[in-house]
Amino acid sequence: MHSGEHPAQALEGDVRKAHGRARVAMAALVVTALIRVYNVGARWWQSGLIHEAQAGRTPEQGVLEQSDALVQLGAVFTLLILVVTGVVFLRWLHKTVALTRALGGDTLRFTPKDAVLGFIIPIWNISRPYQVVRDVHDHLAPDAVPEPQVQVRADDAMGYRQVAMVAPPQAVKVPHASIAAWWGFFWVGNIFANIAARQQGQTLDSLLLGNTFNNISDVIDVVAATLGVLMVRVLDARLAERFRRIRYNRPEDLQAAGIEIAPELSGARAA
């Protein structure tokens, strides 16, 4: 570290990278929700055609084929966005966990690797993702960081003889219940999707039942994706606020508050 350099200065690039990954993760979650809405509409149309056929009003063959093609296209898009969202979300989480530990949150029990594996390893992925997001959320709380002194700067509109006071923004937080709801909706959606997958019969009734369970799953997944956007946004905002407070506090004030900065993100640079 160069003489006079702030201990958090070396983390500025990593914080910008985390913000970029957060935006990509939120965009992927939004696309996930939109595809789920599309799926519900496509299956709703297909189910309506099936009901017509059961009532003796058989739709044209071309219309039936078109509805089936739209449902199959939705299934392909769903699989693709599931993979993409999983990758970009975990890349964001990996970097955010590393920064949380580096910004004085070294008591966080999860390493970046632990956080990622918690979403992948069976049994662990039942509760570990909630625990990771909850603990990162709490460790990023800026309350333990001294409030930076109000900055004074010249106001261009008023002239250099007058100044504007720049106060730090308020921290953003969500209740743990919202984090639990996010992961709970994700699991409930998966349960209904698995039930739908078991409706493999060739009859129209089995297809209708499968569409019903799939639509329930997709509606739940829309809620889960919406809450996921909220989780990413909140954690990203708390990261930004904690870093800003640390970055613009004097090193001696941080030391007095018991906050130690680790500018080297061990195991996180390659990610």
Image (cartoon, rainbow, N blue to C red):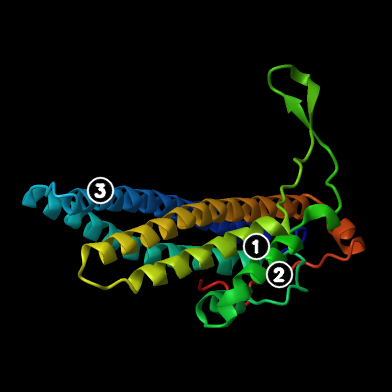
Q: CA distance from mark 2 to mark 3?
A: 53 Å
Rendered residue at 65%/59% (across/down): 179
Earlier sequence position, callout 3 versus callout 1? 3
Q: Is residue 204 above or below residue 62?
A: below
The residue at which mark 2 appears reads as 101
Task: Tell me the quarter of the picture where residue 68 sits.
Answer: bottom left
x then y, percent, for residue 52: 19, 48
Q: Is residue 63 above or below residue 144?
A: above
Local crowd size for mark 1, using a 10 Å CA cut-off: few (<14), some (14–19), many (≥20): some
Q: Quadrant of the N terminus?
A: bottom right
Of the residues shown, which amino acid type is indicated by label 3?
Gly
Which element carries disc 2, helix, strand or loop?
A: helix
Earlier sequence position, callout 2 versus callout 1? 2
Of the residues shown, which amino acid type is indicated by label 2?
Arg
The residue at which mark 1 appears reads as 180
Task: Point out which mark residue 48 bears.
Answer: 3
Local crowd size for mark 3, using a 10 Å CA cut-off: few (<14), some (14–19), many (≥20): few
Query: 30 and 5: which one is in front?
Result: 30
Q: Is residue 1 visible?
A: no
Q: CA distance from mark 2 to mark 1?
A: 22 Å
x then y, percent, for residue 29: 46, 54
x then y, percent, for residue 131: 67, 70
Rendered residue at 47%/70% (across/down): 191
Local crowd size for mark 2, using a 10 Å CA cut-off: few (<14), some (14–19), many (≥20): many
x then y, percent, for residue 238: 69, 53
